[in-house]
Image: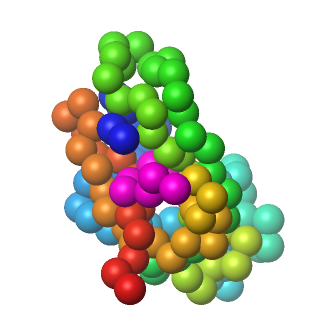
């Protein structure tokens, strides 16, 4: 399974997310008042409107919540990546918060959901994208 050609979107609001991934960290926005992590960030924190967000490093290990195997390339310029897996990963300690990421090194589709994974950012078209691989046993 390959890594699709992907360029992260250019957005000042999400720059800390992509910067952290490039540095090998997973950072998500948290309410500046109570610390609750929210992903995907809304214009304002739902828990304390007006408090704003601070970016915090979160666990780089988690569990696959769900996944999909992509069998056909659909991104421009991507001719060799398929098939590849994309999934929602719930980082440890963040119940209900799920990050979209590539799932690397998982070939048996029947055993993916519930798999313990570790963060493994992957190079893609000169960028680095969020990815997870099976955690060591």
Asked if residue 75 lies left or right of residue 97, the reply is left
Asked if residue 56 lies left or right of residue 69, the reply is left
- Residue at the image position 50 percent from the left and 45 percent from the top: 85
- Residue at the image position 38 percent from the left and 86 percent from the top: 137
Q: Name the outermost residue toward the left.
A: 126
Give the percent coordinates (x, y) of residue 111: 59, 65
Residue 8: name its quadrant.
top left
On-image quarter of the N terminus: top left
**Res 39 seen here:** no
Asked whether 63 falls inside the magenta stretch, the response is no
**Res 111 seen here:** yes
29, above or below 81, in the image:
below
Residue 76: name its quadrant.
top left
Give the percent coordinates (x, y) of residue 114: 63, 72
Give the percent coordinates (x, y) of residue 16: 39, 56
Give the percent coordinates (x, y) of residue 54: 51, 70
- Residue at the image position 70 percent from the left and 52 percent from the top: 42
- Range of residues picked out in magenta: 99-108
- Residue at the image position 45 percent from the left and 52 percent from the top: 107
**Nearer the observer, 77 or 70:** 70
37, above or below 9, in the image:
below
State the scheme by which the image is colored.
rainbow
């Amino acid at each position: 399974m390959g890594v699709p050609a992907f360029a992260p979107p250019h957005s000042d609001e999400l720059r800390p997310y992509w910067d952290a991934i490039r540095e090998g960290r997973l950072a998500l926005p948290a309410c500046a008042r109570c610390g609750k992590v929210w992903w995907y960030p809304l214009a304002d924190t739902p828990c304390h409107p007006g408090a704003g967000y601070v970016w915090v490093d979160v666990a780089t290990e988690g569990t696959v919540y769900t996944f999909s195997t992509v069998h056909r390339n659909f991104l421009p310029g991507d001719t060799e990546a398929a098939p590849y897996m994309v999934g929602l990963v719930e980082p440890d300690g963040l119940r209900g918060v799920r990050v979209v990421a590539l799932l690397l090194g998982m070939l048996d589709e029947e055993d993916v959901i519930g798999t313990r994974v570790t963060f493994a950012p992957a190079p893609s078209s000169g960028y680095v994208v969020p990815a997870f691989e099976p955690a060591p046993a």
